[in-house]
Image (spheres, rainbow, N blue to C red):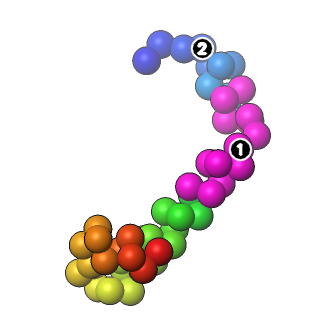
Amino acid sequence: MKLSRSTFYAWLKRPVKPVDKCLIELQRKARDIFRESRESLGYRMLAAQL
């Protein structure tokens, strides 16, 4: 990727969208449930527990 350094840092400083915050929280919950199951749950059981 070719972009200027200032573009990259401007992107880092942008505010996080509410949708992004929601997705991040969902990913954290999914990861925690998966680890608590000793990494044995499939996607169906994981989705059911979310």
Estimate the x, y position of residue 44 in percent, counting from the top left: 29, 71
Going by the image, does 16 lie left or right of 5? right
* Three-letter amino acid code of the residue under disc 2: Ser
Q: Secondary structure at mark 1?
A: loop
In the rendering, which numbered label is found on residue 16?
Answer: 1
> Foreground residue, 5 or 34?
34
Residue 14 higher or lower than 19, as above or below = above
Estimate the x, y position of residue 26 in percent, counting from the top left: 53, 64
Q: Is residue 37 magenta?
A: no
- For disc 1, the neighbor class at 10 Å (few under 14, some 14 to 19, many from 20) is few
Distance (Cα) linking label 2 and label 1 = 21 Å
The residue sitting at 62% across, 48% down in the picture is 20
Splitting the image into 4 quarters, where does residue 46 fall?
A: bottom left
* Three-letter amino acid code of the residue under disc 1: Val
Estimate the x, y position of residue 1 in percent, counting from the top left: 43, 18
- For disc 2, the neighbor class at 10 Å (few under 14, some 14 to 19, many from 20) is few
Q: Is residue 13 magenta?
A: yes
Estimate the x, y position of residue 32 in percent, counting from the top left: 45, 77
Going by the image, does 11 lie left or right of 29? right
Segment colored magenta? 10-23
The residue sitting at 57% across, 57% down in the picture is 24
Dominant secondary structure of the residues highlighted in magenta in the image: helix
Residue 21 higher or lower than 11, as above or below = below
Q: Secondary structure at mark 2?
A: loop
Q: Which residue is denoted by mark 2 in the rendering?
A: 4
The residue sitting at 71% across, 49% down in the picture is 18
In the rendering, which numbered label is found on residue 38?
Answer: none
Residue 4 higher or lower than 44, as above or below = above
Count of labels shown? 2
> Foreground residue, 2 or 43?
43
